[in-house]
Image (tube, coloured by chain):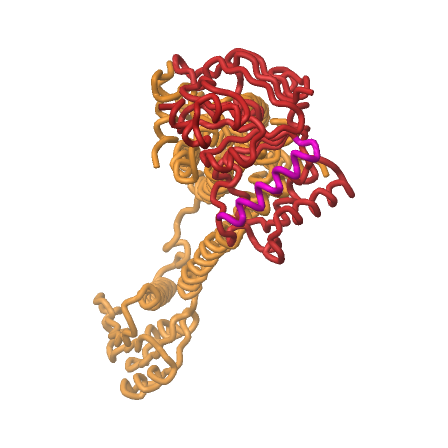
Chain colours: A red, B orange
Amino acid sequence: MIAIEVKNLVKSYGSFNAVNDISFAVNRGEIFGLIGPNGAGKTTTLRILATLLQISSGEVKIFDRDLKHEADEIRKIISYLPEDAGAYKNLTGRAYLEFIAPFFGDGDKSSEIVRKGVEIANLGERINDKVETYSKGMTRRLLVARALMIEPKVAILDELTSGLDVLNSQEIRKLAKKTASEGTTILLSSHNMLEVELLCDRIALINNGKIVEIGTPDELKKRHNCNNIEDVFVKVVA
Amino acid sequence: MNSVTNIIKKEVKELLTPSTLIPIIIMAAIFGSLGNIIGGAGQEATKAPVIGIVDQDHSVLSEVASKTLDKSAKVVFTGSSVSEGLTALEKEDGIALIIIPSGFGERILSNKSGEYQILWIMKGTGLMDTISSSNVDLSLQLASASISKEIIDSHASVNSTIILNPTVKNETTIFKGKEMVGISPGLISGFMSQQAFVVPLIVLMVIIMAGSMVISSMGTEKENKTLETLLTLPVKRSSIVFGKLAGSAIVGLILAVIYMIGLGYYTSSISAGSPIDMAKYGLTLDAFDYILVGISLFLGLLSALALCMLLGIFAKNYKSAQTLTMPITLLAMIPMFAVMMLDFNTMPLIGQVLLFAIPFTHPMMAIRSLMFDDYTLVVGGIVYETIFAIATMAIAVWLFRKDILLTGRLTAGGKKQSWSPLWNAIQRMSRRK
């Protein structure tokens, strides 16, 4: 079943096309990676799919809901994690999760969402401390927990492990894999080629607002006769 | 929990922190202390000065002077020895020894000025020290008046009071259809100027505090990218706008109340109080008037917050948000100064139109207008404020659905300039760090 369907998507700012006629589809439960150099259009694409930016032309469907006309419905089934995002500094980690949870369910459901968030964040007693006292890595874990605790149908993750050390990154990647195996579709962007290769079922290389390659990591390596995705990236983008 | 309530709770928690409260509490405390100091000086001004009297004349006139001084000052020594007088003053913390020399009365009766000798005991050069010596001068003037009365009473057939005050005024002031008997325009203006100073200042402070809360909140949300998360939650854009506005309004009002307590204490301390009963002339507000003032203030605040929300949309981060509070401050200062110095009804038409168009003008002049039963202006202002607030909030909700909320501008990469110079100026300010 197709979870995300993007057809001829264009995002223009005046005469500049940040996203230029891209098309791709992501299957349910799949982890799909968008990779590309800075300014390629990855974040703009993710922001459009997260209902933050308007479409200039083209079509986006998430679980058959049209993004242009059913954005409110789409927000009920997606979760978006921006790159370098923060949380409300004067709230505790728990209070932040408690603020988000009621948007996705009342009473017991809300408490269950918070319980799951606390478990994913895995911050121990520090979950009761104010966010302003957290390290960058702790904040990122809290935000990943916020994004995944609601068990979204689609998780849009911009630089999933940004700011995390090797151990934390590995833990979060395992969590993303587990979440996908439970049925959540994940669309992510990353600069970390190793992460993309380890995590993604399929990837799309994006450059100057256009998708220039798409396929599984193995297919792409074979197609370009490279040993790893980093070499594929350099070959294609350069 | 309702989405709006949830957002309001979060906003209040985020905004109401020790770092926001402490500066305001300190400012209120400083105002209160200033009021105490100035009020203390005022009390000193009305306190009887501590003096000593050395009467070396013992004439009828010197006794009249001594008796008058005794009534208007605290006399801690009466006698004929200067050194004993100085010792007594030193002991009682007195400030002046008045010496009435021998021949004082005789000189006056032979058409020469009587002469006091005053030995001042100076304690300092501060405001209160000057006030004390002024009080002694006042007592001496009263003593001179008593001497004049004594001389007139013993030499003229007409009563001394009539000779000294041969005329009286019986005045009536007509203002805006009200006939106020026994009161001068000066007294009315003096009373109104107290209102004209305090009310606009309070409105200005409320607007600046609550307004900067909204703009800063928007700047911080953009800087931390929490706004992006908020906008992807299943909640209506209008709920986000109302939640943020209400949260900021609550915190702004709390801060304004703290500030107003300090300011109120300050003004009540320095104000000597009105010498006349204004209620007698109908210059007071009834319960309905206060409701109108409250509605006008609430709508003025709502208009300011909605306007700040619009400006906040252009903020890139916390720093640029701070710069964006400037237009609101300026917009609130114009009616503040205008209301302090001028009367809306006597202004030229263009001035009236401009002031009316600024929504903050209406709460600033509501009390004054209602005192003179100008309900048309107040109700008209409330209607205008309502339209302004609704229109501004509608634009804010509309912009919350647009890319501009995240990009902070209409075009990308600075490739195109907007059609409006004002728009360009706001965008430049928002980009400034």
Res. B342 in view: no
Question: Is residue B161 a member of the stretch shown in magenta?
Answer: no
**Residue found farthest to the left:** B112
- Res A212 → quadrant: top left
A121 in relation to B269, above or below: above
For image coordinates 33% across by 73% down, the residue present is: B61
For the N terminus of chain A, the quadrant is top right
For the C terminus of chain A, the quadrant is top left
For image coordinates 48% across by 39% down, the residue present is: A84
In this picture, which residue range is highlighted in magenta? A166-184
- Res A176 → quadrant: top right
Q: Position of residue B243 (x, y in %)?
A: 61, 35
Q: Between residues A101 and B288, which one lies in front from this camera angle?
A: A101
**Which SS type dominates the magenta stretch?**
helix
For image coordinates 42% across by 24% down, the residue present is: A40
Res. B243 in view: yes
Q: Between residues B390 and B71, which one lies in front from this camera angle?
A: B390
Question: Is residue A177 a member of the stretch shown in magenta?
Answer: yes
Q: Between residues B85 and B46, which one lies in front from this camera angle?
A: B46
Q: Position of residue B164 (x, y in %)?
A: 37, 55
A33 in relation to B28, above or below: above
For image coordinates 50% across by 39% down, the residue present is: A85
Q: Position of residue A208 (x, y in %)?
A: 40, 19
Q: Position of residue B316 (x, y in %)?
A: 42, 33
- Res A144 → quadrant: top right
